[in-house]
Amino acid sequence: MVEVFAPRNIIVTGGCGFIGSNFVRYVVANHPGTHVTVLDKLTYAGNRENIAGLPRDRVELVVGDICDADLLDKIVPGHDAIVHYAAESHNDNSIADPEPFVRTNVEGTYRLLEAARRYDVRYHHISTDEVYGDLALDDPARFTEETPYRPSSPYSSTKAASDLLVRAWHRTYGVRATISNCSNNYGPYQHVEKFIPRQITNILTGVRPKLYGDGLNVRDWIHTDDHSSAVWTILTRGRIGETYLIGADGERNNLTVLRDILEMMGRNPDDFDWVRDRPGHDRRYAIDSTKLRTELGWTPGHTDFREGLRRTIAWYSENRQWWEKAKEATEARYEAQGR
Ligand code: NAD
Ligand code: DAU
């Protein structure tokens, strides 16, 4: 029988980012007995507006760094779980400047694990399918929990390192930890540096979308609401020490996704620029989430990618004030990289 953990008071690191804030909103909406302390440094990717308007008796924001051990000593006691989303998350940035990735993703995870160990707090680690490297386009295989680690980029190698720290802290010190590795998320509140929001906001600002390489790289898209429900399922019912892959059978190549966006926004299918490829660009990701589905009974709610994309386009069209400020700085960074 699956043992159920009922968290009353959790810390969500990175709760002002894209996926972490979705999880905070998910918990507030669906689990009234759980209080959330968000720990977020508010880097360029964090935005307090992402959790604005949530009830103050349910959500508290602590602005701070996960690498700050003294801060962790102050806030971790009294909580019964840490759900760790905070990270430097963008591959292109990691290629331009890997240092903050090593610090936040590796050292930050180490600090949190030490705090979880000191205060005997349940720990759930959010990771990525990129730790498994990539698959060929014609390979029928998908990633499973048994696939060997083979990360390609500075970003994914720091995430892989952080996963290995979690495994070691569980085995050596008995930290009550679980890990989830999820595929590419889409939905509202995603930073405009990422593929889907970049193309939507390019079109909304009269700039041509940009496609890397030959556009045939495949990503396995999942709506961020489904990532949140999966994480809650693993946090509350997952087996300690286990890894669960999260995916929603959403494989699509980048050209197809871009053409969907162009069509939905009333543009011609060739209204975009081919740009220089990302160095070391992973070819294909694909997740087999059988373990999560059969062992814990999770299923995704968003099964129609085009419908989810349509709603995401509507959200960016209706919430220009949310992304306009970040857009200019983001495009300046891309211009410096020739993309
Ligand atoms: P994001 O870049 O949108 O948000 C990251 C958040 O972490 C921001 O709020 C930022 O301020 C905060 N942060 C960064 N460094 C910090 C530090 N040192 N201390 C405290 N807070 C800090 O990222 P995201 O896309 O929401 O990704 C969240 C997590 O999910 C990451 O761990 C990422 O690896 C993982 N993930 C992302 C995807 C995806 O498709 N985006 C898929 C699978 C897994
Ligand atoms: O697979 C999970 C990962 O997905 C997460 O761990 C990462 O945090 C998240 O950023 C994402 O990584 P990707 O590198 O796959 O996502 P990104 O949105 O940067 O790019 C998606 C694909 O689109 C990739 O093949 C590169 C391509 N691309 C990206 C941009 C920004 C373009 O063709 N043009 C672009 O302008």
Image: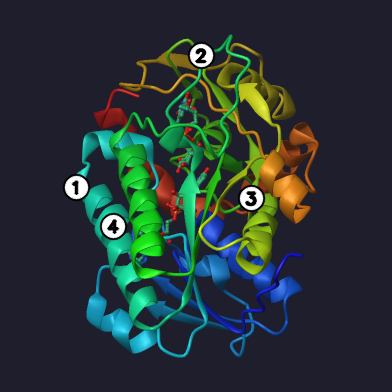
Q: What label does residue 224 carry, if any?
A: 3
Q: CA distance from mark 3 to mark 1?
A: 27 Å
> Is 157 on the left or on the right of 83, as rendered?
left
Q: What label does residue 195 carry, if any?
A: none
Q: Quadrant of the C terminus?
A: top left
> Is 50 on the left or on the right of 313, as rendered?
left
Q: Secondary structure at mark 2?
A: loop
Measured from the top left, where is residue 268 in percent x and y?
Answer: 66, 15
Q: Secondary structure at mark 1?
A: helix
Measured from the top left, where is residue 262 in percent x and y?
Answer: 65, 23
- Residue position marked by numbered label 2 in the rendering: 136
Can see residue 331?
no
Q: Earlier in the sequence, mark 2 or mark 4?
A: 4
- Residue position marked by numbered label 4 in the rendering: 104
Task: Nearest to the eye among marks 1 and 2: give it.
Answer: 2
Residue under the point 68% across and 44% down: 291
Q: Secondary structure at mark 3?
A: helix
Label 3, ligand 1: CB separation under 8 Å: yes
Residue under the point 29% across and 23% down: 338
| Amino acid residing under circle 4 | Thr
Q: CA distance from mark 2 to mark 4?
A: 31 Å
Looking at the image, how many numbered discs can be counted on the residues? 4
Q: Quadrant of ligand 1?
A: bottom left
| Amino acid residing under circle 1 | Glu
Q: Earlier in the sequence, mark 1 or mark 2?
A: 1
- 249 lies above or below 185: above
Q: CA distance from mark 1 to mark 2?
A: 30 Å
Residue under the point 65% across and 75% down: 5
